[in-house]
């Protein structure tokens, strides 16, 4: 029978500790199925496998008193506050249930929420893998964590939403804080208050969800309500080793990322003194996997290996391990790890420091190396935001090489190498330029853009199908300054900075080839 608990307004760290305690109690057979409702004080909730420094604006969270808490489930970072009704459903599992199907569990949880909302007159549409939408706007989301003897399904429903605070706290590249950006984000989300014409009674929403959960999961409800005893809740534990401190950032760490179909994957590797063996491995991502400690187990299997043994060990690991990767596959993990290994070759090929190699975004089919792409390149793409804001050529496809900014140096290097330069003015211009390069049969190109832009607009680069070496920019960044809307339209007024010494090394790699 299903026990229903309402914990009211909670601190998020307490919520996660109670979820873990209840998950273990149900797995051990000490408790039956549990459904708990609660609301959180302002909190940035990290997915189990994410690095905090990559996903959140930690300074803003600290200054605003927004708690930072890691949840036991995978997926991306979320912002939660009193305007969201959260729920946790914990169900027992037996050996007869077989391997958990994460996709099916999330779909079932969303269906239960949808049936509950239908009782309130709100019809929703399931958007795989874990969202409920109304006319294309997100209303609710679900996540999953699996223990050998139990499963935790949990999620949130938007009663109301503080879009501005949400987008300040999260570092993910979404439309942000310009007036138009805020309006765009509000149009991506919808609340029950908006759909019903007035703020709903929390008790009514809760009762509707109880009915939906009970029906979909075939559970009879107990009459009694009692919160989980506080004395039984342990001190919250780290739910994964995938913290920002899992490996020290710095010159000796090789770092990479890869936008997979299931979410963004990240890898950090360190090596022995001779750089012939992998010393330590850290994997992260806004992804959902089973078993939950998969990244930690895989990292342990790779540590100590000769660098050339990484791919064979990956293949043998996935050949014997029973895993589920939601929306991506072992080849994606192989790719992000290989990209981190490639940093060593890039350091040698271009004569650059490890930190400079980490700033490269190499786009192209394996085994084509960054050095080979640089040799084949015939075009250079330069971002307009690296030109001086007052420059009359800032939004024009030209530069007089006046020496007042790094773009002139980029044009000079391109001219000496015989590269055609295109100054990219906005996202649509990028798409047109890539289409043109594809039609012209361009084999490869060089370019510069911020990594956040590359992640968000990765599809455009991939669909062009042209190998590229892109260099991350520094200085003013539209994502850090919350001005993506302006950058998208080509009206970003601050100035980004180019790493000219790095660009010189990359351009020089192809000089002999082009003579």
Image (tube, helix red, strand yellow):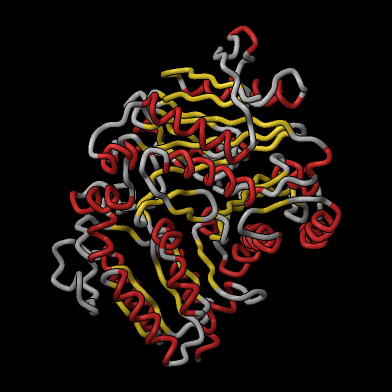
Answer whether residue 50 is visible to the viewer in this image: no
Residue 4 located left or right of residue 299: left
Callout count: 0
Residue 346 lies in what quarter of the image? bottom right
Rendered residue at 23%/76% (across/down): 399
Assign the N terminus to one quadrant of the image: top right
Residue 312 lies in what quarter of the image? bottom right
Answer whether residue 443 is visible to the viewer in this image: yes
As rendered, which of 309 and 264 lies closer to the eye?
A: 264
As rendered, which of 477 and 353 lies closer to the eye?
A: 477
Q: Decide: is 200 above or below 429.
A: above
Q: Decide: is 229 above or below 473.
A: above
| Residue 382 spot, x, y in % from top left | 34, 72
| Residue 7 spot, x, y in % from top left | 48, 17
| Residue 95 spot, x, y in % from top left | 83, 38
Residue at the far top: name it: 231
Rendered residue at 54%/48% (across/down): 286
As rendered, which of 33 and 321 lies closer to the eye?
A: 33
Rendered residue at 41%/37% (across/down): 157
| Residue 301 spot, x, y in % from top left | 80, 47
Residue 365 located left or right of residue 192: right
């Amino acid at each position: 029978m299903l026990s229903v608990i309402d914990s009211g307004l909670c601190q998020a760290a307490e919520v996660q500790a109670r979820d873990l305690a209840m998950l273990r109690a149900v797995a051990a057979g000490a408790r039956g199925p549990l459904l708990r409702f609660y609301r959180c004080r302002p909190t940035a909730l990290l997915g189990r496998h994410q690095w905090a420094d990559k996903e959140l604006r930690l300074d803003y969270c600290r200054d605003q008193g927004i708690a930072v808490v890691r949840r036991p489930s995978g997926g991306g970072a979320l912002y939660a506050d009193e305007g969201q009704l959260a729920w946790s459903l914990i169900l027992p599992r037996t050996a007869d249930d077989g391997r958990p199907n994460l996709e099916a569990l999330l779909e079932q949880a969303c269906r239960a929420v949808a049936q509950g909302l239908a009782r309130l007159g709100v019809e929703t549409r399931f958007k795989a893998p874990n969202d409920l939408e109304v006319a294309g706007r997100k209303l609710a989301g679900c996540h999953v964590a699996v223990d050998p003897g139990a499963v935790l399904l949990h999620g949130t429903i938007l009663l109301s939403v503080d879009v501005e605070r949400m987008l300040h706290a999260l570092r993910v590249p979404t439309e942000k804080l310009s007036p138009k950006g805020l309006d765009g984000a509000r149009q991506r989300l919808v609340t029950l208050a908006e759909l019903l014409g007035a703020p709903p009674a929390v008790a009514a929403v809760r009762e509707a969800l109880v009915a939906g959960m009970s029906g979909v999961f075939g559970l009879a409800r107990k009459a009694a309500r009692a919160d989980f005893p506080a004395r039984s809740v342990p001190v919250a534990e780290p739910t994964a080793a995938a913290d920002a401190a899992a490996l020290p950032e710095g010159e000796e760490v090789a770092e990479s990322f890869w936008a997979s179909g299931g979410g963004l994957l990240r890898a950090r590797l360190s090596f022995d003194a001779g750089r012939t063996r992998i010393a330590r491995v850290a994997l992260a991502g806004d992804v959902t996997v089973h078993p939950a400690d998969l990244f930690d187990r895989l990292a342990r299997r790779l540590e100590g290996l000769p660098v050339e043994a990484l791919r064979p060990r990956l293949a043998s690991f996935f050949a014997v391990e029973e895993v589920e990767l939601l929306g991506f596959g072992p080849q994606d993990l192989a790719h992000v790890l290989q990209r981190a290994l490639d940093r060593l070759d890039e350091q040698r090929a271009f004569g650059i420091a490890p930190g400079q190699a980490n700033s490269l975004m190499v786009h192209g089919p394996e085994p084509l190396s960054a050095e080979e792409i640089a040799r084949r390149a015939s075009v250079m793409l330069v971002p307009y935001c690296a030109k001086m804001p007052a420059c009359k050529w800032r939004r024009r496809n030209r530069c007089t090489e006046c020496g007042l900014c790094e773009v002139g140096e980029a044009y000079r290097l391109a001219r000496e190498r015989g590269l055609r330069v295109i100054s990219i003015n906005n996202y649509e211009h990028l798409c047109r330029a890539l289409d043109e390069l594809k039609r012209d049969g361009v084999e490869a190109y060089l370019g510069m853009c911020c990594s956040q832009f590359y992640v968000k607009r990765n599809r455009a680069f991939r669909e062009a199908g042209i190998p590229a070496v892109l260099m991350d920019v520094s200085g003013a960044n539209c994502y850090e300054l919350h001005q993506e809307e302006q950058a998208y339209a080509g009206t970003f007024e601050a100035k980004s900075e180019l790493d000219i010494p790095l660009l010189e090394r990359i351009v020089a790699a192809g000089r002999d080839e082009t003579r």
